[in-house]
C-alpha cells in the first residue's frame, strides 16, 4: 500500500512516518506521536521562514527566531536570520491584537534611530499575521534582571546608566515624530550582539499622525505604566520617562517598583501616587535623584525634556568615577527647581 500523502494540516512523524493532525496545534508546538510515542516539534514553517526557537512573548503574539528557507529571498538588509512576531488567526484575541501588530509595523518604521529594533515587513494571510523584525542576539533587559536575581547580584549602576542613555536617545527620536511609546518595560529593551540597547514593540504607541488603536482595557504592563496613563491620559514623553525610570529601578533593585499583581486600575492609580521606594536600591545619591525625577507621580515635576534627562544621566556617568556626580546632580536639581519656581512666580 502506498503511504498517505500529507495535506497542509498533517505532518509526518520523523521517527515512524505516521501522519499527525496539526489542525488544532499552534506553531512550533511539541506533541507526542500516538504511534511511536516520540515527542515531535510540529508546524515549524511559516510562509518563507523556518522557525528555529521561541524567542519570547510579545504583547500581540509569540516571537520566534526564524531562518529564510531560501537565502536568495533575504530581506533588503540581506538578513537570513530574523525575528518573527506571530499572531495566529485562530487565537481568540486575534481581532484585538491585529491592530496592535499593524500599529507596531507603522510606528516603529517612522522612528529614524539606530536604537529602534528594525521592522522589515508585516505579512498577513489565512494563518494570521507576522511581523518580520531584526533578531536581537543579546536578549532582553528582563532576562538580565532574572539572571542577576538568580545570582543575587544587582546590575552595575554604570551599565544601567548606559542603557538609560541609549533608550533616551530613541525616545527623543520618537518625540520628534510625535510618537509616545507608552509600553516601556524590561522585556521591550533588547540588546544586539555588541551589547547595545534597542527599543522594541511600538504596538501600544501613539502618534499625532496616526489614528490611535482602540483599547477596551489596560494593555500596558502595570509595573511600569505612568499614573496619568492609568487615569486615561494618552501620555507624552514624560510618561515614557516614567516607564524607563521604573525599568531602571527594576534593574537595580531586581524587583519592580510596586506590588501590582491582582490590583484593579483604581488601586494601581492610588498606589502610584506614592513615590517609588528608592531606599530599596543599591544606588548612588545621584542615581537615586535621577530616578526620583523620572518617576515623580506628577508629570509636571519630571524632567521638562528628554534632553534634560540625558544631560543629568551623562553627568552622573561621567563624574561618578571621581565622586563628583552626586554634587553635580544636586546643584543642577536645585537650580532647576529654583528656575521653575521663579518662572511660575
Image: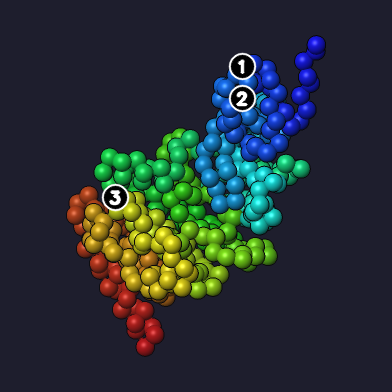
Q: Quadrant of residue 194?
A: top left
In the rendered structure, the answer to whether residue 8 lies left or right of residue 29 reads: right
- Above or below 81: residue 317: below
Q: CA distance from mark 1 to mark 3?
A: 51 Å
> From where the camera sits, is residue 35 visible?
yes
Instruction: Identify the residue under disc 1.
Output: 15
Q: Earlier in the sequence, mark 1 or mark 3?
A: 1
For residue 157, the mark is 3
In the rendered structure, the answer to whether residue 60 lies left or right of residue 268 reads: right
The residue under the point 63% across, 43% down is 86
- Above or below 267: residue 193: above
In the rendered structure, the answer to whether residue 237 lies left or right of residue 130 reads: left
Q: Earlier in the sequence, mark 2 or mark 1?
A: 1
- The mark closer to the camera, 1 or 3, is 1
- Above or below 60: residue 25: above
The residue furthest left is 323
- Above or below 214: residue 126: above
The residue furthest top is 1
Q: Nearer the viewer, residue 133 or 40?
A: 40
Mark 2 neighbour class, 10 Å CA radius: few under 14, some 14 to 19, many 20 or more: some
x and y percent of residue 345 in the render?
37, 88
Q: Nearer the viewer, residue 287 or 43?
A: 43
Q: Nearer the viewer, residue 124 or 112?
A: 124
x and y percent of residue 109 in the render?
63, 50
Instruction: Identify the residue under disc 2.
Output: 33
Whether the residues at callouts 2 and 1 have beta carbons within 8 Å, the answer is yes
Amino acid at each position: 500500500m502506498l503511504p498517505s500523502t500529507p495535506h497542509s494540516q498533517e505532518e509526518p512523524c520523523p521517527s515512524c512516518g505516521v501522519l499527525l493532525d496539526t489542525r488544532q496545534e499552534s506553531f512550533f508546538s511539541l506533541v507526542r506521536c500516538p504511534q511511536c510515542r516520540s515527542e515531535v516539534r510540529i508546524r515549524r514553517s511559516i510562509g518563507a521562514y523556518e522557525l528555529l526557537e521561541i524567542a519570547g512573548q510579545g504583547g500581540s503574539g509569540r516571537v520566534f527566531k526564524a531562518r529564510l528557507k531560501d537565502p536568495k529571498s533575504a530581506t533588503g538588509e540581506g538578513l537570513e536570520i530574523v525575528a518573527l512576531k506571530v499572531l495566529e488567526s485562530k487565537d481568540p484575541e486575534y481581532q484585538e491584537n491585529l491592530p496592535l501588530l499593524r500599529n507596531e509595523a507603522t510606528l516603529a518604521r517612522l522612528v529614524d534611530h539606530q536604537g529602534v529594533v528594525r521592522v522589515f515587513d508585516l505579512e498577513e494571510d489565512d494563518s494570521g499575521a507576522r511581523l518580520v523584525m531584526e533578531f536581537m542576539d543579546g536578549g532582553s533587559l528582563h532576562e538580565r534582571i532574572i539572571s542577576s536575581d538568580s545570582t543575587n547580584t544587582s546590575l552595575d549602576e554604570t551599565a544601567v546608566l548606559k542603557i538609560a542613555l541609549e533608550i533616551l536617545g530613541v525616545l527623543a527620536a520618537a518625540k520628534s515624530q510625535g510618537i509616545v511609546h507608552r509600553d516601556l518595560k524590561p522585556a521591550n529593551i533588547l540588546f544586539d550582539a555588541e551589547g547595545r540597547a534597542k527599543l522594541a514593540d511600538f504596538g501600544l504607541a501613539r502618534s499625532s499622525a496616526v489614528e490611535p488603536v482602540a483599547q477596551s482595557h489596560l494593555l500596558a504592563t502595570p509595573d511600569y505604566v505612568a499614573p496619568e496613563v492609568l487615569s486615561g491620559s494618552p501620555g507624552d514623553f514624560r510618561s515614557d520617562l516614567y516607564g524607563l525610570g521604573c525599568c531602571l529601578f527594576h534593574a537595580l533593585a531586581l524587583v519592580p517598583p510596586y506590588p501590582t499583581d491582582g490590583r484593579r486600575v483604581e488601586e494601581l492609580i492610588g498606589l502610584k501616587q506614592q513615590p517609588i521606594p528608592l531606599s530599596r536600591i543599591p544606588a548612588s545619591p545621584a542615581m537615586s535623584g535621577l530616578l526620583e525625577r523620572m518617576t515623580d507621580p506628577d508629570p509636571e515635576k519630571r524632567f521638562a525634556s528628554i534632553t534634560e534627562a540625558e544631560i543629568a544621566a551623562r553627568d552622573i556617568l561621567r563624574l561618578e568615577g571621581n565622586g563628583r556626580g552626586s554634587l553635580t546632580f544636586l546643584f543642577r536639581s536645585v537650580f532647576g527647581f529654583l528656575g521653575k519656581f521663579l518662572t511660575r512666580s
